Image (cartoon, rainbow, N blue to C red):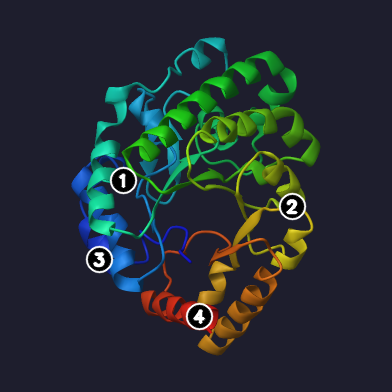
């Protein structure tokens, strides 16, 4: 078990370290990456560390003018909505992510046998940020380009797929034990649109990663209707958010696919008896899958009590070792 966004805003030690440091600066300092990644491992004794970074880091690394604004998220100064904009997206080069390589090396030395999970944002989610200029509820500019200019969409997604692959390969080559591809916004699409306009690119990424002997996890939010397609893309593990019971998710993914999830992060604000009951139910349903990684159904919420996460970690370990 591990928690998505376990290294982050819910930890007081994280807030102290990040007090005067902008997010993207923190993501480019190996010492800070290492410290923040290790904080939840020390506190909770989770079974894996998740590399502290952000999905827009590779875009920043190739020169895209963007920032992460507190309370807003990634904001792009000059949104990409035409062919000239797409041409600004170049491939990742070896020198672009030297700090990632250094940080992964430091982490694997400190973690020992405990695995480090690398991650990257999936092409659709990166495309949405680039096209919209920031977070979007309706993704209207993104969908307009996807529907109306399929050739430009293809070129954009090809370039973003190459950037994503380069970011993941850098982490694996440096020592990451597994990788997760986040597609935070892909739940905004229908199954038909996903199959036509996203699946070819995520499949290509997972196919390229098959040369490595590392587990590949695929996760998206609000993707209950897309779970079969997320599995079809080629991941070994499909992350399930809290909206779909795991025993139902088993019926939607490819045979042999493990599942990850899926306690609602908001549950952690309820009394412990509720958390324990719902966790026990998830563990029971997870036993119907071909492998189960216990996790939340999305990231840890900022106001979550760290003591609740520690108690949950201990509870899952006790329940699964019996």
Residue drawn 51% across and 33% down?
211
In the figure, 34 relative to 201: above or below? Answer: below
Q: CA distance from mark 4 to mark 1?
A: 38 Å
Name the residue carrying label 3. 13
User: Percent position (x, y) of residue 87?
Assistant: 49, 12
Residue 7 or residue 142, whichever sits in front = 7
Residue drawn 51% across and 10% down?
84
Q: Judging from the image, what secondary structure is the residue with disc 4 in?
A: helix
Residue 147 or residue 111, whichever sits in front = 111
Q: Earlier in the sequence, mark 1 or mark 3?
A: 3
Q: Nearer the viewer, mark 2 or mark 1?
A: 2
Q: Nearer the viewer, mark 4 or mark 1?
A: 4
Q: Residues within 10 Å of mark 1 (few under 14, many from 20)?
A: some
Q: Judging from the image, what secondary structure is the residue with disc 3 in?
A: helix
Name the residue carrying label 2. 255
User: Percent position (x, y) of residue 183?
Assistant: 58, 43
Q: Is residue 193 left or right of residue 96?
A: right
Q: Nearer the viewer, mark 3 or mark 4?
A: 4
Q: CA distance from mark 1 to mark 3?
A: 15 Å
Residue drawn 71% across and 18% down?
150
Q: Which label sits on residue 119? A: none
Q: CA distance from mark 2 to mark 3?
A: 41 Å
Q: Is residue 243 visible?
A: yes
Q: Judging from the image, what secondary structure is the residue with disc 2 in?
A: loop
Q: Residues within 10 Å of mark 3 (few under 14, many from 20)?
A: some
Q: CA distance from mark 3 to mark 4?
A: 30 Å
Name the residue carrying label 4. 321
Q: Is residue 95 left or right of residue 302?
A: left
Name the residue carrying label 1. 23
In the figure, 287 relative to 53: above or below? Answer: below
């Amino acid at each position: 078990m591990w928690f998505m966004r376990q290294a982050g805003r819910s930890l007081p030690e994280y807030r102290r370290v990040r007090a005067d440091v902008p997010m993207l600066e923190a993501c480019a300092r190996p010492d800070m990456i290492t410290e923040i990644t290790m904080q939840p491992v020390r506190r909770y004794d989770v079974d894996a560390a998740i590399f502290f970074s952000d999905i827009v880091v590779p875009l920043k690394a190739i020169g895209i003018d963007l920032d992460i604004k507190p309370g807003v998220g990634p904001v792009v100064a000059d949104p990409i909505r035409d062919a000239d904009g797409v041409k600004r997206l170049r491939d990742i080069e070896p020198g672009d992510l030297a700090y990632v390589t250094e940080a992964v090396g430091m982490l694997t030395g400190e973690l020992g046998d405990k695995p480090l999970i690398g991650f990257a944002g999936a092409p659709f989610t990166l495309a949405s940020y680039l096209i919209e200029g920031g977070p979007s509820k309706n993704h209207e500019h993104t969908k307009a380009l996807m529907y109306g200019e399929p050739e430009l969409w293809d070129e954009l997604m090809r370039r973003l797929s190459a950037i994503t692959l380069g970011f993941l390969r850098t982490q694996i080559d440096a020592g990451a034990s597994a990788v997760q591809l986040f597609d935070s916004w892909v739940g905004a699409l229908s199954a038909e649109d996903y199959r036509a306009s996203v699946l070819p690119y995520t499949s290509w990424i997972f196919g390229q990663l098959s040369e490595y002997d590392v587990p590949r996890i695929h996760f998206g939010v609000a993707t209950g209707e897309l779970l079969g397609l997320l599995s079809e893309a080629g991941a070994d593990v499909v992350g399930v958010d809290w909206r779909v019971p795991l025993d139902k998710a088993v019926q939607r993914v490819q045979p042999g696919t493990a599942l990850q999830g899926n306690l609602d992060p908001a549950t952690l604000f309820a009394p412990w008896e509720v958390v324990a009951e719902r966790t026990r139910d998830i563990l029971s349903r997870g036993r119907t899958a071909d492998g189960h990684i216990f996790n939340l159904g999305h990231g840890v919420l900022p106001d979550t009590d760290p003591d609740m996460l520690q108690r949950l970690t201990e509870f899952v370990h006790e329940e699964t070792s019996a």
